[in-house]
């Protein structure tokens, strides 16, 4: 009887049961397919616009590229594919070559511009490979685009009570709208979709993975939360918010939302990243309560092509969306005598393991790292114990596919 009453109430007054987190109406974003129109469909990579959130009182549209094995001419109509949503970082846009990479991998892929603009038309080389549209030509501001991808829209916006001015609100909402749209396409397997983003796109991936539980996998590259702490280059902008700082952190810092993340998540970053520092990165990783994995690369460069290059991103998403073999899973390192011992699980044999540590102090982006080999025996890795003055260290393992993952990074207080 009680269940029937609840059903009746939800039908009569759905707003009472609406799922809302911060400024995001999750029910609306998940269940309402946004209006869209094709801009171009005469090339292997299609372009489109779809409806976004209102900005400063007016309707908006978001530009996106879309491709699948069907649009590339590598599959026939009627076939179905897992889907992936691709989120660019600061200075970026919808990248046609990124969409093509995933379509060639067997996915239906969508990449949107989160700057209220559209990039130049796609061009192809003699082999049919998309030329880097995001790094050439002139981007055009859409007449009814959303907020620009600028610092005032990211941070100062919190001072006004109207969330329609806020870039973080629009960014996460536009991604969830793109996800809903992608799931509506007949060639997409709606129950097997993933999201990955780079830099500010990694930041947005953290938000979306914490808000949209329809994804089966999420891979934030570089981006993380706790941007108001430590050496984060974003900290000064957040500190300037004064009395509004706490509100920004609560609403828009991923560290406040990642505790609700239930999507399997794979964090990818480098040891010396100046934009998303290792301390904040590990805090972000640690607050995730569900399935999580990590890949820390010594001196990984920061950028869009370096951010989508690691093959582990595709292998992780394959394992969640296509039945692919999972990445190795190392356990927590234990100090035993003069060694560090790590147990691991892996469906693919391991070929190498390494201990990585630094004894440097000062800015993390300037610290030098030392790497020493470890041994593999059965399902156990053994490495020399880091020296007493090592303040940060972790173990990496590499399988026969050359896929590398890490243990959680150990940080001295």
Image (cartoon, rainbow, N blue to C red):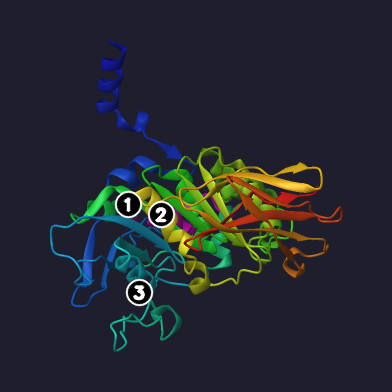
Asked where in the image residue 344 lies, by quadrant, the reply is top right
The residue that label 2 is drawn on is 317
Say which of marks 2 and 3 sits in front: 2
**Position of 386 relative to 69 (above/below):** above
Q: Residue at x 37, y 67 (%)?
A: 145
**In this view, which residue lies farthest toward the top?**
1
Main secondary structure of the magenta stretch: helix
**Position of 224 relative to 47 (above/below):** above
Where residue 353 appears, as percent x and y from the top left, is 63, 57
**In this view, which residue lies farthest toward the left?**
77
- Find residue 104 and name its label: none
Seen from the viewer's position, the closer of residues 407 and 16 is 407
Q: Are marks 1 and 2 in contact (CB under 8 Å)?
A: yes
Where residue 237 appears, as percent x and y from the top left, is 67, 61
Where residue 398 appears, as percent x and y from the top left, is 56, 59
Q: Residue at x 27, y 51 (%)?
A: 183
Gap in angstroms between the C-alphas marked 1 and 3: 23 Å
Seen from the viewer's position, the closer of residues 357 and 134 is 357
Q: Per the image, is 163 magenta?
A: yes
The residue that label 1 is drawn on is 322
Where residue 412 appears, as percent x and y from the top left, is 79, 49
């Amino acid at each position: 009887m009680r269940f029937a009453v609840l059903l009746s109430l939800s039908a009569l007054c759905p707003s009472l049961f609406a799922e809302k987190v911060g400024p995001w109406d999750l029910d609306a974003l998940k269940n309402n397919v946004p209006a869209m129109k094709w801009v171009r469909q005469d090339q292997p990579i299609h372009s489109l616009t779809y409806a976004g959130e209102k900005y400063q009182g007016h309707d908006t549209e978001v530009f996106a590229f879309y491709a699948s094995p069907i649009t590339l001419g590598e599959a026939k109509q009627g076939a179905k594919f897992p889907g992936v949503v691709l989120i660019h970082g600061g200075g970026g846009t919808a990248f046609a070559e990124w969409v093509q990479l995933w379509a060639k991998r067997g996915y239906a892929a969508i990449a949107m511009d989160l700057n209220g603009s559209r990039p130049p038309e796609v061009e192809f080389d003699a082999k049919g490979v998309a030329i880097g549209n995001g790094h050439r030509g002139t981007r055009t501001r859409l007449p009814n685009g959303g907020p620009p991808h600028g610092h005032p829209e990211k941070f100062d916006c919190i001072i006004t009570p109207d969330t329609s001015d806020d870039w973080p609100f629009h960014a996460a909402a536009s991604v969830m709208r793109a996800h809903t749209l992608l799931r509506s396409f007949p060639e997409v397997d709606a129950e097997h979709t993933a999201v990955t983003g780079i830099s500010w796109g990694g930041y947005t991936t953290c938000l979306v993975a914490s808000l949209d539980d329809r994804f089966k996998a999420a891979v934030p590259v570089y981006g993380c939360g706790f941007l108001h702490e430590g050496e984060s280059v974003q900290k000064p902008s957040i500190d300037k918010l004064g009395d509004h700082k706490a509100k920004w952190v609560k609403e828009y810092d991923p560290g406040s939302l990642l505790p609700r993340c239930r999507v399997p998540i794979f964090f990818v970053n480098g040891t010396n990243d100046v934009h998303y520092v290792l301390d904040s990165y590990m805090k972000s990783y640690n607050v995730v309560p569900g399935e999580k994995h990590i890949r820390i690369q010594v001196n990984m460069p920061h950028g869009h092509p370096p951010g989508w290059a690691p093959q582990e991103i595709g292998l992780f998403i394959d394992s969640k969306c296509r039945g692919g073999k999972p990445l190795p899973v190392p356990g927590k390192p234990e100090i035993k005598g003069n060694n560090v011992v790590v147990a691991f699980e892996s469906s693919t044999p391991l070929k190498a393991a390494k201990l990585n540590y630094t004894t440097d102090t000062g800015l993390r982006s300037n610290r030098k790292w030392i790497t020493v080999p470890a041994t593999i025996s059965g399902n156990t890795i053994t490495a020399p114990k880091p020296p007493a003055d090592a303040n940060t260290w972790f173990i990496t393992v590499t399988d026969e596919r050359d896929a590398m993952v890490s243990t959680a990074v150990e940080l001295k207080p």
